Image (cartoon, grey):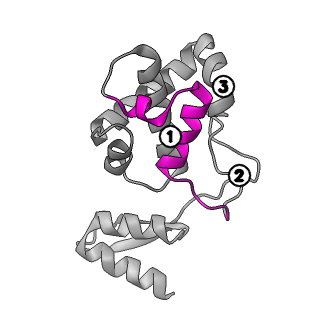
Amino acid sequence: MVKENWILDAAWKNRQSAKNAVRKNNVKMMLVPHPTLPKTWIEVESPKKQENEGDKYGLSKKDEEAEWETSEDILKEVADFCKMTIDEIQKKTRKREIVEARQVAMFLSTKRTHESLASIGRGIGMKDHATVLHSCKIVKGLWETSPEYRRKWGKLLT
């Protein structure tokens, strides 16, 4: 109960800090502003996922007690998969194979870590949060439309 009270107190001060507190403390609730009462927040429990249910990209955590990865771990995993070095992926270049690897690393980092978009971007080639969002949009779009892309990245994304 102490955790929940602290989160509710944080909500009064800053909505973003409340969201981060919920995420970091693995509390299964969400704070939403009440539509009619001024400065009043209500608790809404998040819907529970079924045991074997995953998102449509196959990227959900199967064991909720498992430690979350860091963007550095994911960057190394993508680099090994692509047979590149981490420095090559972080390099400022627009070569197609490097850009794809960087985009996939950003996408996986948003799905598998609790890091902010800005910190993910900084860790993967000194990019900003908008670049990370754009990368996620590109990877999702290609995954849904391109069988060749699914063949190429399927082992890493599933």
- The residue indicated by pointer 2 is 62
Q: Crowdedness of circle 2 by 10 Å Cα count: few (<14), some, many (20+)?
A: few
**Looking at the picture, which amino acid does disc 1 mark?**
Leu
Question: Which badge, 3 or 1, is on the more N-terminal residue?
Answer: 1
**Looking at the picture, which amino acid does disc 3 mark?**
Gly
User: Which residue is painted at 71% across and 51% down in the image?
Assistant: 62
Q: In this view, does 60 lie above or below 48?
A: above
User: Which residue is painted at 38% across and 15% down in the image?
Assistant: 95
Left/right of residue 5 with respect to residue 13 in the rendered view: right
On-image quarter of the C terminus:
top right
**Looking at the picture, which amino acid does disc 2 mark?**
Lys
84 is within the stretch colored magenta: yes
Closer to viewer: mark 1 or mark 2: 1
**Residue 75 circle label:** 1
Q: Position of residue 79 (x, y in %)?
A: 54, 33
Q: Are marks 2 and 3 in contact (CB under 8 Å)?
A: no
Q: Which residue ends up furthest to the bottom in the rendered image?
A: 2
> Which image quadrant for residue 123?
top left
* Secondary structure found at label 3: helix
Question: Which badge, 1 or 2, is on the more N-terminal residue?
Answer: 2
Left/right of residue 28 with respect to residue 66 in the rendered view: left
- The residue indicated by pointer 3 is 154
